[in-house]
Image (cartoon, rainbow, N blue to C red):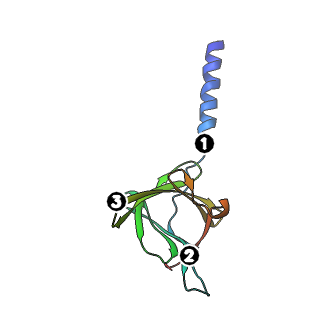
Amino acid sequence: MRFAGIIALSALMLASTSAVAKKPMAWPTGIYSNVRMSAETGDLGGMEARFYEENGEHMVEFVWCEGWCNQTYTSKLTRYDNGFEFHYTEVYEGGEGTTKSDYHFVAWPDGKKLKISAWQGRESLDYEGKPQVLRRIKQPF
């Protein structure tokens, strides 16, 4: 009798745990940006990310503008409990050969905004230790 009670209690706990299990975070969609033009120099700075689904995969088209928006990268998006991550490899061709730099990004929602932190290898690229804050926009900058 006691064993049956333990089994019933265990089943009830499992049912209640699954009932209150956290629903997976929704995949981001649309365009988020904080790209701005400097009034003094005309330089562009900031990040822009377009999130979409293609062939059942969640993707991000991403550009990081530093002076100008030179290169757009497309990467698969991975979802975790508290956010998303993506990465790309930038290839430089020069007189000394080919150099590759790996960049890693973590994005997470903050209300209607999206925050993104960046790393090159183990080095954080966040300006003053703070993530970039991107707002939802209707069309690319």
Nearer the camera: disc 1 or disc 2: 2
92 displayed left or right of 20: left
- Circle 2 Cα neighbour tier, 10 Å, few/some/many (<14 / 14–19 / ≥20): some
Q: Which residue is mark 3?
A: 55
Among numbered discs 3 and 2, the one appearing first in the sequence: 2
Name the secondary structure under disc 3.
loop
Nearer the camera: disc 3 or disc 2: 2
Residue sitting at 54 percent across and 50 percent down? 122
Residue sitting at 66 percent across and 13 percent down? 2
Q: Which residue is mark 1?
A: 21
State the residue lying farthest toward the front: 96
**Spot occupied by residue 118 in the image (x, y as percentages of width and height):** 55, 59
Q: Amino acid at mark 2?
A: Gly
Residue closer to the observer: 38 or 63: 38
Residue closer to the observer: 116 or 27: 116
Nearer the camera: disc 1 or disc 3: 3
Image quarter where the N terminus lies is: top right
**Spot occupied by residue 40 in the image (x, y as percentages of width and height):** 61, 87
Name the secondary structure under disc 1.
loop
Among numbered discs 1 and 2, the one appearing first in the sequence: 1
Q: Which residue is mark 2?
A: 45
Name the secondary structure under disc 2.
strand
Among numbered discs 1 and 3, the one appearing first in the sequence: 1
Q: Quadrant of residue 57?
A: bottom left
- Residue 33 in sight from this viewpoint: yes
Residue sitting at 41 percent across and 71 percent down? 71
Residue closer to the observer: 66 or 36: 66
**Spot occupied by residue 90 in the image (x, y as percentages of width and height):** 40, 62
Q: CA distance from mark 3 to mark 2?
A: 32 Å
